[in-house]
Image: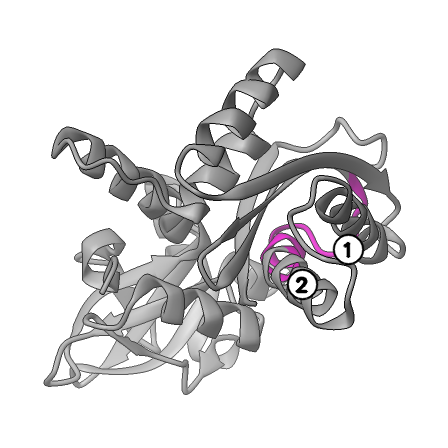
Amino acid sequence: MGMLVKDIMSKNPISITPETTVIEAEKLMSLNKIGRLIVVENEMIIGMLSDGDLVIEHDLNAPIKKFMSKHPIKVKQDITVQEAARTLSDHQIGGLPVVDEKDRLVGIVTSWDIVYGYLKYEENERAMEKKTITPESSAIYLAMTRSREYEQYWLEKIKGYGYKGAITQTGASAEKLPIKLRESTTVAAIARDVINENSREKIAVSNAVKDAYSQLALINPGLGGGFKIAVVRGEGQITVAIFGKFGHALVDGPEQLTVGSSVI
């Protein structure tokens, strides 16, 4: 069945009420180093507040109910991580409240939780001495390599698990970045025999890139950047990991890592 949301979510998330003021919400985000808060009233989730909602200058004493996103999308704790990742991507959002079978708030899951959940899962598999590595983990490790030698090491390693992989890199302005990512990844996948040069398989790569890029765009909308892209083909799926920096000079921003996948 794979990883479930309850295995990787952040438990006991910080929640606020609709009457919490802007300054109180900002302090909570700053002190806890988080980018979103769940709004709860009468034990029901009624909204989400992100740091992006507070970018515009507001009256610091105003209640956050004026700025929060209402009726947020929720997920059950027993769905798969893959389903949660797809929900984040499809709805262009950065985090999801997690509820139990009685619709009670039990956690929050973000794009970062999902990325590092894949790594945690693979480490656990190693600890249990299982000879498996997921396509997601393979793509993450490939994308985060920092030398040609290490790239080759991981390309050979994943081949031993029956996967095919390729790696490339690209940089572009915000307007051209989605196209450049898709084109570079597709060319690399064809060149390394990860996919055949037919429409169905190229579309699968494109969808996986779109999945990963949509998460990047949520983090730093409107900026170009320089990224390394890994594409891995496992049984019935294509996985893409994008790793690099946003910034006007391609070096300004912090390093970002996202993962996308598509059925093939």
Which quadrant is the N terminus positioned in?
A: bottom left
Q: Nearer the viewer, residue 163 or 2?
A: 163
Residue 199 point in image, percent of width and height: 77, 71
Q: Which quadrant would residue 98 be assigned to in this image?
A: bottom left
The 10 Å Cα crowd at callout 1, few under 14, some 14 to 19, many 20 or more, is many
Secondary structure at numbered mark 1: helix
Magenta-drawn stretch contains 181: no
Q: Which residue is label 2 attached to?
A: 210
Q: Earlier in the sequence, mark 2 or mark 1?
A: 1
Place of residue 100 in the rendered image (x, y in percent of width and height, measured from the top left): 14, 76
Q: Nearer the viewer, residue 233 or 18?
A: 233
Question: CA–CA distance between discs 2 and 1?
Answer: 8 Å
User: Which residue is identified by label 1?
Assistant: 182
The answer to whether residue 92 is above or below residue 94 is below
Image quarter hosting the C terminus = bottom right
Query: What residue type is disc 1 on?
Result: Arg
Please say if the residues under marks 2 and 1 sit with CB atoms less than 8 Å apart: yes
Is residue 243 visible to us here? Answer: no
What is the magenta range? 213-225
